[in-house]
Amino acid sequence: MNQLNYRWYRCLAPLAAFIATVAFTSSAFAHAMPQKEVPAPTTTVAAPQQVSITFDDPLEPAFSTLTLTNAKGQRVTKNKSQVAADNHKLMTLVLPALSPGRYTAHWAAVALDGHRTHGEYSFRVK
């Protein structure tokens, strides 16, 4: 390698490494994760009218879902969850009147860039 090419390599190699690091880091953090759940996990509450989850990244409404099951694992509503039109980080599920007991919210979130995450959490109704 001649002296001129070596100098260019020494200048461009760190730049290429930086660009690769930024690209990897941004893709690693592109997964939408819950920031706030209402009702909150592991709490005991009066029967809520809805379950809502606020995520840290905007969601793709067509592919993101929120469902609720009772202690027997049965789905408690036929309603579909909604991603708010004015806030794509907020997903809600309107609920029927809930009986006392343990409920589990199951969510699947697809970020606008296509990355999918999912999870669940439980709460109790008095």
Image: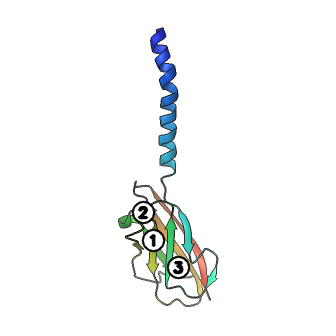
Q: Secondary structure at mark 3?
A: loop
Looking at the rendered structure, the kind of residue marked 2 is Leu
* Farthest-out residue, left: 62
Q: Amino acid at mark 3?
A: Gly
Cα–Cα span, label 2 and label 3: 26 Å
Residue, disc 2: 59
**Upstream in the sequence, badge 3 or badge 1?**
3
Q: Is residue 48 above or below residue 5?
A: below
Frontmost of labels 3 and 1 is 1
Corner quadrant of residue 45: bottom right
**Marks 2,1: beta carbons within 8 A:** yes
Residue at x-position 44% and y-position 55%: 115
Q: Position of residue 118 (x, y in %)?
A: 50, 63
**What residue is disc 1 on?**
91
* Amino acid residing under circle 1: Met
- For label 1, the crowd category at 10 Å Cα-Cα, with few meaning under 14, some 14 to 19 and many 20 or more, is many
Residue 53, above or below 114: below
> Can residue 1 be seen at all in this image of the molecule?
no
Q: What label sits on residue 119 in the rendered view?
A: none
The percent position of residue 17, horizontal first and vertical second, equals: 51, 32
For the residues bearing labels 3 and 1, Cβ distance under 8 angstroms: no
Residue 67 in the image, given as x and y percentages of width and height: 46, 75
Count the marks: 3
CA–CA distance in space, label 3 to label 1: 21 Å
Query: Which residue corresponds to mark 3?
Result: 73
Q: Earlier in the sequence, mark 2 or mark 3?
A: 2
In this picture, residue 82 sits left or right of residue 49: left
Q: Nearer the viewer, residue 18 or 125?
A: 18
* Viewer can see residue 110: yes
